[in-house]
Image (cartoon, rainbow, N blue to C red):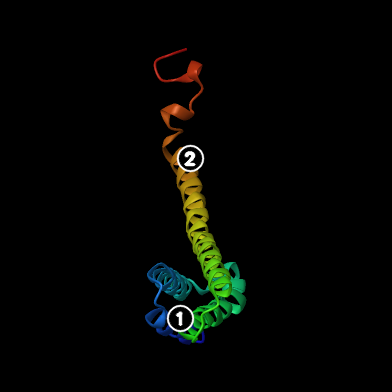
C-alpha cells in the first residue's frame, strides 16, 4: 500500500512523456513493480529479497520519471540531461527486472526442495528410479 502511490506517480509521468520509447519503458517499470507487489502479497516472507527495490529503487524511479517529463516540458529542453535521465530509466528497468527475477528464483528454490523431498519419499517407498540404480544392479541383471 505504501509503494502503490509511487507506481501511480510513474504512470502519470509516463502519460506526460512525449518520447514514446521512454514512456513505454516507464510503463514497463510500473508493470514489473506491480508484479513484485503481487508476489509479495502472495508470500510476504519474500520481502527481504526486494527490500532495497521497495525502499530505494522504486522511490528514485518515481522521481526520475517525473524529472524526465519535466525536462521534456521545459521551454528549452536540455538534450544532455534528457539523454542521461533516459539512460537511468533504462538502467532502472534492468534493476527492476533483476529484483523480479529474484522473486522467481525463490519460487524455483522452493520447487527444487519439493522435488528433492518427493524423490526421497518415492525412493524410500518404491525404490529408486531405474536411472538412479547403478548399471550393474538393474532389474534382470546381475
From the image, tell me which residue sits under label 1. 10
Q: Give the crowd class for mark 2: few <14, some 14-19, many >=20 residues within 10 Å.
A: few
From the image, tell me which residue sits under label 2. 124
Query: Residue 8 at what x, y percent from top left?
Result: 43, 84
Specify the label residue 97 is tagged with.
none
Work out whether 41 lies above or below 116: below
Q: Give the crowd class for mark 1: few <14, some 14-19, many >=20 residues within 10 Å.
A: many
Residue situated furthest front in the rendering: 76
Between disc 2 and disc 1, the foreground one is 1
Q: Residue at x 58, y 67 (%)?
A: 49
Q: Residue at x 41, y 69 (%)?
A: 28
In this picture, residue 63 sits left or right of residue 128: right
Q: Residue at x 43, y 68 (%)?
A: 25
Circle nearer the N terminus (2, 1): 1
> Helix or strand or loop: what does disc 1 sit on?
helix
Query: Residue 36 at what x, y percent from top left?
Result: 47, 70
Q: Residue at x 55, y 64 (%)?
A: 91
Residue situated furthest top in the rendering: 142
Disc 2 versus disc 1: distance between alpha carbons? 54 Å
Query: Residue 115 at what x, y percent from top left?
Result: 46, 47
In this picture, residue 31 sits left or right of residue 56: left
Disc 2 to disc 1: CB gap under 8 Å: no
Image label count: 2
Work out whether 49 lies above or below 63: above
Near-viewer residue (30 or 34): 30
> Helix or strand or loop: what does disc 2 sit on?
helix
Near-viewer residue (46 or 102): 102
Query: Residue 32 at what x, y percent from top left?
Result: 44, 69
In this picture, residue 4 sits left or right of residue 49: left
Residue 138 picture quarter: top left
Amino acid at each position: 500500500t505504501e509503494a502503490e502511490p509511487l507506481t501511480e506517480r510513474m504512470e502519470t509521468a509516463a502519460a506526460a512523456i512525449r518520447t514514446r520509447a521512454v514512456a513505454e519503458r516507464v510503463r514497463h517499470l510500473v508493470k514489473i513493480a506491480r508484479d513484485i507487489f503481487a508476489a509479495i502479497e502472495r508470500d510476504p516472507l519474500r520481502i527481504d529479497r526486494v527490500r532495497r527495490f521497495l525502499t530505494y529503487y522504486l522511490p528514485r524511479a518515481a522521481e526520475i520519471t517525473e524529472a524526465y517529463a519535466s525536462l521534456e516540458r521545459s521551454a528549452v529542453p536540455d538534450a544532455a540531461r534528457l539523454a542521461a535521465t533516459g539512460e537511468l530509466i533504462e538502467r532502472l528497468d534492468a534493476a527492476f527486472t533483476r529484483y523480479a527475477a529474484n522473486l522467481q528464483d525463490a519460487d524455483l528454490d522452493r520447487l527444487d526442495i519439493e522435488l528433492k523431498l518427493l524423490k526421497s519419499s518415492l525412493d524410500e517407498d518404491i525404490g529408486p528410479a531405474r536411472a538412479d540404480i547403478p548399471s550393474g544392479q538393474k532389474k534382470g541383471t546381475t
